[in-house]
Image (tube, helix red, strand yellow):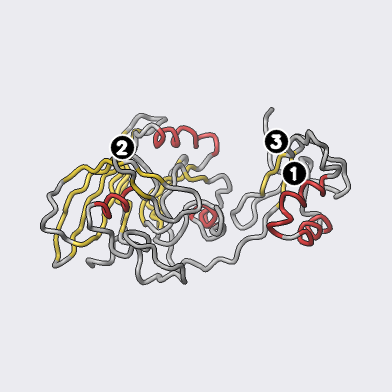
Amino acid sequence: MKVPGAPLGQRGGVDAVRVRLPADPEGVWGTVRDHLVARYGRVVGVERVDAMFAGGEFVGVDGRPVVPDEPYTAGRYIWFHRDLPGEETVPFEVGIVHRDERIVVVDKPHFLATTPRGRHVAETVVARLRRDLGMPELQAAHRLDRLTAGLVLLVVRAEDRGAYQTLFRDRRVRKEYEAVAPYNPGLALPVTVRSHIVKERGVLAAYEVPGAEPNSESRVELVERRGGLGRYRLVPETGRTHQLRVHMNALEVPLVGDPLYPVVLDDGPEDFQRPLQLLARALEFPDPFTGAVRRFESRLRLSALG
């Protein structure tokens, strides 16, 4: 069954939450309120759920407020706007590298998340640009780690998103990164690192499994040396979470400013003066609509080497 369009517009560049009421084989939810209290009561509190009903914040497919004592109907769609978390403003701009009728390529600053998720919703690339550019359908074709700066490809129209996402899924996008890390004269470069990386939900740092079949591959090259630091070119062949950070740490040259590798630091206020020294420098791919090879390069610079 086709999912109906949202009856609620965006709020601050953030989509409304869509809920499809699940099957209730044991008949424990007599009313819509029963289910939403069971689903969200522990998260936001029963009082907040009731306040949202009273304020008409839960709506059905026709945009009309849902009444709390309406009989429960499995399969029904309901929308609402979530309460946004308190977010610290990231004091850096999103730079526009390229813009046309299909895509927007931007330079994401350090500390700014790519897409709304978890604790980062309004302070994200997608939400900011939807507001600033007046493009409500704008979506990211891929994700870039929040602490990493550099190029992100966004799609203007929803119907085009799948074509660009497929490029990333099929590894047809060449990515080049730049990093600053300690210089180790005993490290023979260039080198290709292959390992099996695991990232568990709820655990901050990923880890390698010795002897397991590799699921990640990165090429590491030294570009220049300045004193005890080196500037490196990193070319990932796969896209595991934290892959480049894990591989550089495995080579015993962890990235400057990395709060997770080799040691997970205590969580605290963001230090905007000490960003992770990792930059998504270039993206190159065949355009899925024209076939032309497109290449974009970041205009940002890592601060550790000036």
Q: From the viewer's perspective, is the residue at label 3 or at label 2 nearer?
A: 2
User: Residue 283 occupies which quadrant of the picture?
Assistant: top left
Q: Earlier in the sequence, mark 3 or mark 2?
A: 3
* Mark seen at residue 102: none
As measured in the structure, the alpha-carbon distance from the residue carrying label 1 to the one carrying label 3 is 10 Å
SS for tag 3? loop
> Is 160 displayed left or right of 67 in the figure?
left
Q: Where does residue 198 sit, x and y in percent of width and height?
A: 40, 45
N-term-proximal mark, 1 vs 3: 3
Most extreme residue toward the front is: 211
Residue topped by disc 2: 214
Under mark 1, the amino acid is Ile
Q: Is residue 115 above or below residue 292?
A: below
Residue receiving disc 3: 4
Q: Nearer the viewer, mark 1 or mark 3?
A: 1
Could you tell me residue 195's position as x and y percent?
Answer: 29, 41
Whether 261 is drawn above or below 238: the answer is: below
Real-space CA distance between mark 2 and mark 1, rounded to the nearest whole angstrom: 43 Å
Which amino acid, by three-letter code, is at mark 3? Pro
- Is residue 32 left or right of 93 when viewed as pictured? right
Q: Is residue 204 left or right of residue 249?
A: right
- Is 144 drawn above or below residue 2 in the view shown? below
Q: Are marks 1 and 3 in contact (CB under 8 Å)?
A: no
Label 3, label 2: how far apart the Cα atoms are:
42 Å
Q: Which residue corresponds to the image point at 33% horizontal and 32% vertical from the top-left?
A: 292
The quadrant of the image that shows the N terminus is top right
Of callouts 2 and 1, the N-terminal one: 1
Q: Secondary structure at mark 1?
A: strand
Q: Residue at x 78, y 33 (%)?
A: 25
